[in-house]
Amino acid sequence: MKVLSFLPLLLRRPCLRPAWLSSTLIRATALELVILAGHVLIYPSGLTPERRHPMPPPGTEDGPAPDPERLTRSADPAGATETADTAETADGADPTGTAGTTALPSAAGTRPPVVLLHGFIDNRSVFVLLRRSLARHGWHHLESLNYSPLTCDIRTAAELLDRHVEEICARTGHREIDIVGHSLGGLIARYYVQRLGGDRRVRTLVTLGTPHNGTAAAPLAGAHPIVRQMRGGSDLIEELRRPAPGCRTRFISFWSELDRVMLPVETACVDHPDLDAVNVRVTGIGHLALPVHPAVASAIRQALESDGASLGAGGAAPGAASVA
């Protein structure tokens, strides 16, 4: 396990001092309230399915425009979850895949799809800014998975994610994907990777404020079964502590010292001897800001582009990074 001082986020400020820690917390809390108000406004838009756009053939994502004849051969199974609705990824055409069509050719050498997985009682709208940031910087295949707010078991949600990932791989020709999960979404993705064999499909798992070791926050919400599974010492958390030899997925975990949902805040770190994990300390923002802050988005892009070795270069020692 590594703890990384993430250079792209560093604003070259002095370390936090107790004299102005309270003002930093006040600013972070104010930002959380603004983000919450904005998210409430756009939340209904995330309840509707994303429009599905044809996937660019492998090898053309950063090059010439796709050949329409090749696009018509893209598999588009009925009921599959849609591709992200961004102007940067759209060609203006509707999907043409039907039953019996063939999957895309091998996608070796191209960027893998990125699946965005939201948190508890949320939906895909939480990633609207991150999705646009990724699309502007060359990620053409972005997908979101909405799981029901009535979901009562992380294991069941992980099985749904398994089916979703297999559908994406079959439809696009990619053998691997990346996942970005916020809060509970990161825990669902970790269970899929670590306990359901998802490491064969997931190249990199980025988690944002995920209770990897369980959280003691929101005790009044403990009546919900899935909240109880996120408690420290739950059967599910203990299951994730079991050995995971040979796990191939690379973990990048962002955690914030001002995250009031993660108690203690270090619970958002991946701490497992068998996992290839880098924990990124972020200062100056809270839980809700993690998936929307532009500096965090920049760090996520670097994490997805890096090979692990370059990401951890010089970052073995603990350090702070500020996005305030």
Image (spheres, helix red, strand yellow):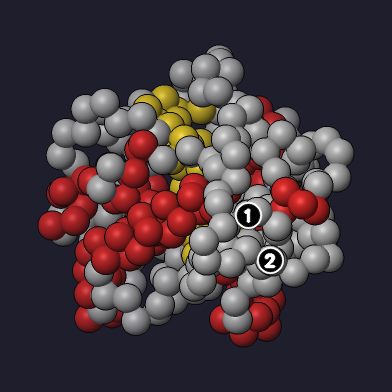
- Vertical placement of 204 versus 235: above or below? above
Where does residue 307 sit, x and y in percent of width and height? 55, 23
Where does residue 113 sit, x and y in percent of width and height? 58, 46
Q: Secondary structure at mark 2?
A: loop
Could you tell me which residue is drawn at 34 percent across and 44 percent down?
A: 198
Q: Can residue 25 be seen by looking at this rendering?
A: no
Where does residue 233 sit, x and y in percent of width and height? 15, 54
- Vertical placement of 18 versus 77: above or below? above
Residue at mark 1 to residue at mark 2: CA–CA distance: 8 Å
- Quarter of the image for residue 7 reads top right
- Vertical placement of 280 versus 158: above or below? above
Amino acid tagged 2: Thr
Could you tell me which residue is drawn at 55 percent across and 52 percent down?
A: 102
- Quarter of the image for residue 147 reads bottom left
CB atoms at circles 1 and 2 under 8 Å apart? Answer: yes
158, 165: nearer the viewer: 165
Q: Earlier in the sequence, mark 1 or mark 2?
A: 1
244, 39: nearer the viewer: 244
Could you tell me which residue is drawn at 52 percent across and 61 percent down?
A: 100
Of the numbered discs in the image, which one, if any, rests on residue 74? 1
Could you tell me which residue is drawn at 52 percent across and 66 percent down?
A: 99
Amino acid tagged 1: Ser
83, 230: nearer the viewer: 83
Q: Can residue 197 be seen by looking at this rendering?
A: yes
Where does residue 248 sit, x and y in percent of width and height? 36, 29
Q: Secondary structure at mark 1?
A: loop
Reading the image, the residue beneath label 2 is 96
Viewed as shown, does residue 254 lie left or right of 289? left
User: Few, some or many C-alpha atoms within 10 Å of disc 2 (few <14, some 14-19, many ≥20)?
Assistant: some
Q: From the image, which quarter does the N terminus lie in?
A: top left
219, 291: nearer the viewer: 291
Viewed as shown, does residue 117 lie left or right of 106? left
